[in-house]
Image (tube, helix red, strand yellow):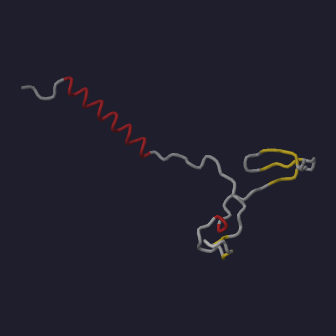
Amino acid sequence: MKRGTKGSRIVRKRFFAVFYCLLLYLLIPIKVDAFKLPDTGQTKCYNTAGGEIPCAGTGQDGEYNISPLSYTDNGDGTVTDSIPALCGSSRLTT
């Protein structure tokens, strides 16, 4: 009986090719921070009863100031949001 026929060698080669491609896919780091989400602007922290508490060590959003909101007055009646670089009117209309 012959061991390792041509058909089984092809199957084995394909298996290892797929295996190595999958391994490379899993080992290559993927950039997940393609864009930054703006901070919520929350500066206070609260307990479960709704009372204000110190933020240190709570893990709540008010404890972090990672990507603060940033607006620039263009001096022409518009403002620019520097995070997504959007521009809009600075006048409120009702």
**Who's the residue at 21% across and 23% down the image?**
7
Residue 15 in the image: state x and y as whole percent: 29, 33
**Who's the residue at 67% across and 75% down the image?**
51
**Who's the residue at 88% across and 50% down the image?**
90
Q: Residue furthest left?
A: 1
Q: Residue furthest right?
A: 76
The relative height of residue 19 versus residue 27 in the rendered view (above or below) is above
The relative height of residue 71 versus residue 22 in the rendered view (above or below) is below
Name the image quarter holding the N terminus: top left
Out of 52 and 73, give the one closest to the viewer: 52
Out of 9 and 86, give the one closest to the viewer: 86
Residue 82 in the image: state x and y as whole percent: 77, 50
Q: In which quadrant of the rendered view does residue 11 lie? A: top left
**Who's the residue at 82% across and 44% down the image?**
87
Out of 5 and 88, give the one closest to the viewer: 88
Residue 62 in the image: state x and y as whole percent: 67, 67
4 sits to left or right of 57: left
Q: Residue furthest top?
A: 6
The relative height of residue 29 versus residue 39 in the rendered view (above or below) is above
28 sits to left or right of 45: left
